[in-house]
Amino acid sequence: MNRVSRRLATILATDCVSFSAHMENDEVGTLESLTFCRNIIDKTISDAKGRIFHTAGDSVIAEFASPVECVQAAHQFLCSIAEHNRTTVSRPALEWRIGIHIDDIIIEGDNVFGSGVNVAARLESVCDPGRILLSRFVAEQVKKRLDLPIIADGTRVLKNISDSFEVFTIQHSTTEK
């Protein structure tokens, strides 16, 4: 039996809100906007020493060694996209939501597996548009290291994971004052 390669990682899952509806209304404009957003997302993740290991259309899943760098990157690309949406009227404004979780992962080639990936994806799926949803584990690691307000946001039901998963969100200027 082959030995499984494991390590602790921070997983970021992000997805464009209502992407299918945008594509149905304006495929070319939506694709242009998606390309613009993905350039921001991909560069920000790379600059923060993250690694994208899966994409599917409008979704991105990445891993980071540091939860601080992960949350900073997520906040940065949400703010950059929100600013672009405020100043550009020619394309559909795409909103993103993000889930972040820390867990032990399995590495197989260039891909990453494990319940941590699933939890991050489930957090993203229950996150409000334009927001970041953190697991308790991530919130504990970053709350004293970042100058961002980390706010308890109750519990969520995560499909096939838990019916009472404690979550936190970041209050930031793209959605609130």
Image (cartoon, grey):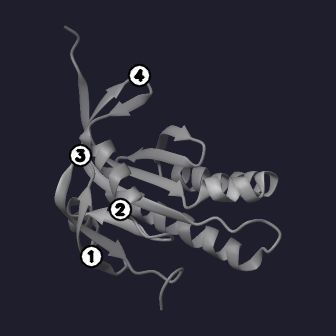
Front label number (3 vs 2):
3
- Residue at 33 percent across and 43 percent down: it is 117
| Among numbered discs 1 and 3, the one appearing first in the sequence | 1
- Element at badge 1? strand
Name the residue carrying label 2: 68
> Residue type at mark 1?
Asp
| Residue 66 visible in the displayed image | no
Name the residue carrying label 4: 109
| Among numbered discs 3 and 4, the one appearing first in the sequence | 4
> How far apart in space, not on screen, are marks 4 and 1 (Cα)?
36 Å
Q: Which residue is the extreme one toward the top?
A: 1
Front label number (1 vs 3):
3
Name the residue carrying label 3: 160
Is 140 rendered above or below residue 106? below
Structural crowding at the residue carrying mark 3, measured as other residues with C-alpha within 10 Å and reported as few (<14), some (14–19) or many (≥20): few
- Element at badge 4? loop
- Element at badge 3? loop
